[in-house]
C-alpha cells in the first residue's frame, strides 16, 4: 500500500506539467493564427479601389495648397503686462493673404494692424506668452482681428518668424 501513493503522485506531477505546456502552446498558436489572419485580411481582402479612393479623398481634403501672397509686418518690441515692467517681447509677424489685392489692403491698413498687435500683446503676461497654448491663442486672436481690419479680403494664416521674450 505504501507503493500506491507514490505511484499516484508520480502520475499526477507529469499531468500538471503537460497541461501548462499545452496551454502555452495553445496560446502561441492562437497568437500566430490571429496575426496571420490580420495580415491576410489587410493584404488580400481589402479592396484596392477602396484604398485608392481614401487616398483621393485625403488629397482632395488637403491638397498641396498654393502658398498665398506673403506680407511682412515690421518688427515689434513691446512690454508685457508685468508689475515691474521688466518683460519684453520681440516679435516678427508675416501674413499669408489670399490675393494681391489683400496685400494692397494690408499695406494701406499697416498702422491699424500694428496697433492691433501692440494693444493685444501689451495686455498679455509672460506666463501667457511662453506656453505653446498661449502662442496658439495669440495667433488665433490676431488672425481674427486682422480679418476684421482688412475685410472683405482675408488673412489665410499668420506666421511668427521671430519670437523672443526677455
Image (cartoon, rainbow, N blue to C red):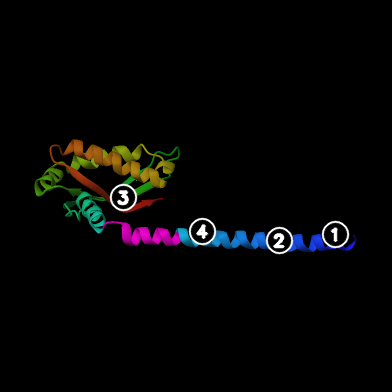
Mark identifier at residue 5 = 1
Q: How many badges with numbers are in the image?
A: 4
Q: Which label is found at residue 30?
A: 4
Which-is-in-front pick, marks 1 and 2? 1
Question: Of tags 2 and 3, which is closer to the observer?
Answer: 2
Q: Mark 1 or mark 3: name the one nearer the start of the chain.
A: 1
- Res. 73 visible in picture: no
Q: Which residue is located at x 19 percent, y 44 percent?
A: 155
Q: Can you identify the residue that label 2 sits on?
A: 15
Q: Is residue 105 magenta?
A: no
Q: CA distance from mark 4 to mark 2?
A: 22 Å
Separation of marks 1 and 2 at Cα, in angstroms:
16 Å
Is 120 above or below relative to 48? Answer: above
**Residue 104: x percent and y percent?**
10, 46
The one nearer the camera, 112 or 146, is 146
Q: Mark 4: few, some, or many residues within 10 Å (few <14, many ≥20)? A: few
Amino acid at each position: 500500500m505504501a507503493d500506491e501513493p507514490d505511484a499516484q503522485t508520480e502520475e499526477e506531477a507529469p499531468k500538471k506539467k503537460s497541461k501548462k505546456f499545452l496551454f502555452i502552446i495553445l496560446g502561441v498558436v492562437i497568437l500566430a493564427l490571429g496575426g496571420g489572419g490580420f495580415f491576410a485580411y489587410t493584404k488580400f481582402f481589402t479592396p484596392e479601389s477602396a484604398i485608392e479612393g481614401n487616398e483621393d479623398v485625403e488629397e482632395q481634403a488637403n491638397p498641396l495648397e498654393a502658398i498665398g501672397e506673403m506680407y511682412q509686418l515690421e518688427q515689434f518690441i513691446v512690454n508685457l503686462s508685468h508689475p515691474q515692467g521688466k518683460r519684453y517681447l520681440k516679435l516678427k509677424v508675416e501674413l499669408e493673404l489670399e490675393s494681391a489685392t489683400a496685400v494692397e489692403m494690408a499695406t494701406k491698413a499697416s498702422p491699424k494692424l500694428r496697433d492691433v498687435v501692440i494693444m493685444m500683446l501689451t495686455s498679455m503676461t509672460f506666463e501667457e506668452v511662453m506656453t505653446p497654448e498661449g502662442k496658439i491663442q495669440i495667433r488665433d486672436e490676431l488672425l481674427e482681428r486682422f480679418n476684421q481690419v482688412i475685410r472683405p479680403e482675408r488673412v489665410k494664416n499668420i506666421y511668427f518668424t521671430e519670437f523672443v521674450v526677455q
